[in-house]
Image (tube, grey):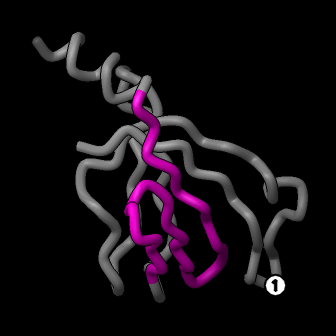
Amino acid sequence: MLAVLATKIRSNGEASVATAVGKAYEGFLISEPVVGRGMVIFRDPNGRRMVTTAVRRILTTEQRQLFYVETENSVYRIAIVDHLAARASTAVG
């Protein structure tokens, strides 16, 4: 499980909402994004989640602490967040 901060940096769809660009979503990825599948970010312990359209491509940095995910409708900057990982491990243990 990856603790992440996902920021929507571009909308591609015709009916996209421009106000959502720049919005940050803090939560957890169960696994890394996979091309062809929607990306799911769990946002709170009550089960609320954000589900994207199918992933088109994934760009990573050398350190793999930051990557970019292009979906059918948007582009997201995903940053691995250490303070969220610590909070998740204490909640589980």
> What type of secondary structure mainly makes up the magenta span?
strand
Residue occupying image coordinates x 22% and y 11% = 90
**Quadrant of res 68:** bottom right
Residue occupying image coordinates x 33% and y 77% = 37
In the rendered structure, which amino acid carries the disc numbered 1? Glu
Whether 41 is drawn above or below 27: the answer is below
Number of numbered discs visible in the structure rendering: 1
Query: Neighbour class for label 1 at 10 Å: few (<14), some, many (≥20)?
Result: few
Of 4 and 11, the residue lying toward us: 4
Mark 1 falls on what kind of element?
loop
Residue 10 x %, y %:
76, 71
Whether 48 is drawn above or below 22: the answer is above
Q: Which residues are magenta?
A: 58-82
Q: Is residue 26 magenta?
A: no
Residue 23 x %, y %:
75, 47
**Quadrant of res 70:** bottom right
Q: Label 1, on which residue?
A: 14
Residue occupying image coordinates x 35% and y 86% = 36
Left or right: where does residue 93 sit relative to residue 11? left
